[in-house]
Amino acid sequence: MNRFFRTFSRLFVGVVFVFSGFVKGVDPLGFAYKLDDYFIAFGMEWAMMFSLFLSVMLCAFEFTVGAMLLSNIKMKFTSWIVTLLMAFFTLLTLNDAIFEPVPDCGCFGDAIKLTNWETFYKNIVLDVFVVIIFLSRNNYKSSLKCFTQWSLAVIYFVVLMLFSFYNYRHLPLIDFRPYKVGNKIEMQSDADAVYYLQYKNIETGESQEYISPNYPWNDSVWLSKWEYVGQRVEKQGTEQEFDFVVETLEGDDVTESILEWENVFVFVSYDLSKMSEKDMEKVGRMIHEFDQNNIEYLWITASLPDEIEKIAAYYPYFNSVFLADGIMLKTMIRTNPGLVWLDKGTIRAKWHQNDYPTGKKWTEIQNQIR
């Protein structure tokens, strides 16, 4: 086969795999959420506990395969791996396109959004080049020794794995979402939100979804057998880039007033029950600084009222609590809880719970507010 086509195919597929692994690796928690969607769609809720681990491993593996193609190392082995991967992805995305178990496969994370059919067609194009790579696998030669080639592969994997872990322990170094720092959150228009609450049976593992508020929230027997998993929102009407809708505990929409607030710090927690005592201690120290400097703060969560009451009874500084969609909160910031600085709807800064501003950074923020 023509050397040009062999080389082009290797480089093209390699770039796609490296890019795909990188943009998901920069946001491993986001890819873990996508894996959760697949597990729920295929009735594999038991696997959700492994989502984050699989996210980091799969991103590192995909990146490594792409880097091996670009480096022209272990091509016989790599050609088999990339062929098997593309066969699996092609069948999976065909299933997604026909049956739509999930609205977006997330193959390029939040960097590039494709419909399920677009993703399938993209894979068909890639398959053409993968076939060329596979048929030419014996023609690729490397001047590097076998040990050096395997060493490079291990280095690629470890580097991307550590990179993903860093982004998980902090915030993504590159934010591809609408809620990135510097963006202004716009009010939704011509769109009504429908909230779906997701519950799981403690005994059987069965999942059930209810349209809020039409669920047996006042049935104590039912509540003892079912646990709250999360919620999702569907917008009816004009599609909007932002799905930012905030309500009081009584159900009143306060989105507009929050977006008009100057220099308010928002603690975002999609699930209060997943916060540890150490998390709350960090929050308490931050709130002490807010109180000392007369800085406004509030909470936005997707947790149910009983969980909110439980936290409020134990922590006196847990107040000014509002409700929002859990998926929106997960999109807004990749940590639970996280801190967002809003100034008239503009996102001035965001912090992971491991990186709340202190010392010189906090002094600089206070000077900007004054």
Image (spheres, rainbow, N blue to C red):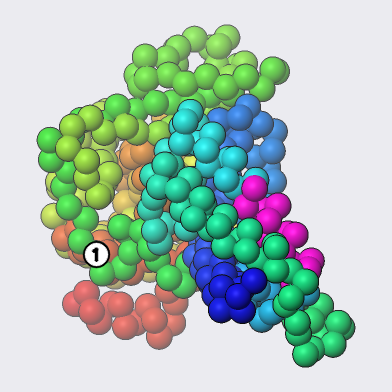
Crowding near pointer 1: few (<14 within 10 Å), some, many (20+)?
few
Q: Does the magenta stretch mainly form a helix, a strand or a loop?
A: helix
Magenta stretch, residue numbers: 75-87
Asked whether residue 64 appears in the rendered view, the answer is no
Residue 169 or residue 341, whichever sits in front? 169
The residue lying at 73 percent from left, 59 percent from top is: 81
Instruction: Say which residue appears at 16% left-offset and 60% top-offset.
Output: 344
Q: Position of residue 19 (x, y in %)?
A: 51, 68
Could you say which quadrant of the image residue 237 lies in? top left
Name the secondary structure under disc 1.
Answer: loop
Residue under label 1: 183
Q: Is residue 301 above or below residue 221?
A: below
The quarter of the image holding the N terminus is bottom right
The answer to whether residue 200 is visible is: yes
Figure check: 246 above or below 25: above
275 lies above or below 7:
above
What kind of residue is marked 1?
Answer: Asn
Closer to the camera in the image, 182 or 95: 95
The residue lying furthest to the front in this view is 1
- Residue 6 vs residue 270, the one in the foreground: 6
Q: For the C terminus, give its image quadrant.
A: bottom left
Q: Is residue 201 left or right of residue 16?
A: right
**Residue 266 image-quadrant placement:** bottom left
Against 4, residue 295 (above or below) is: above
Q: Is residue 151 left or right of residue 283?
A: right
Residue beneath the point at 63% across and 58% down: 131
Image spot of residue 273 (x, y percent):
55, 40
Residue at the spot x=66%, y=31% of the render? 44
Q: Quadrant of residue 128?
A: bottom right
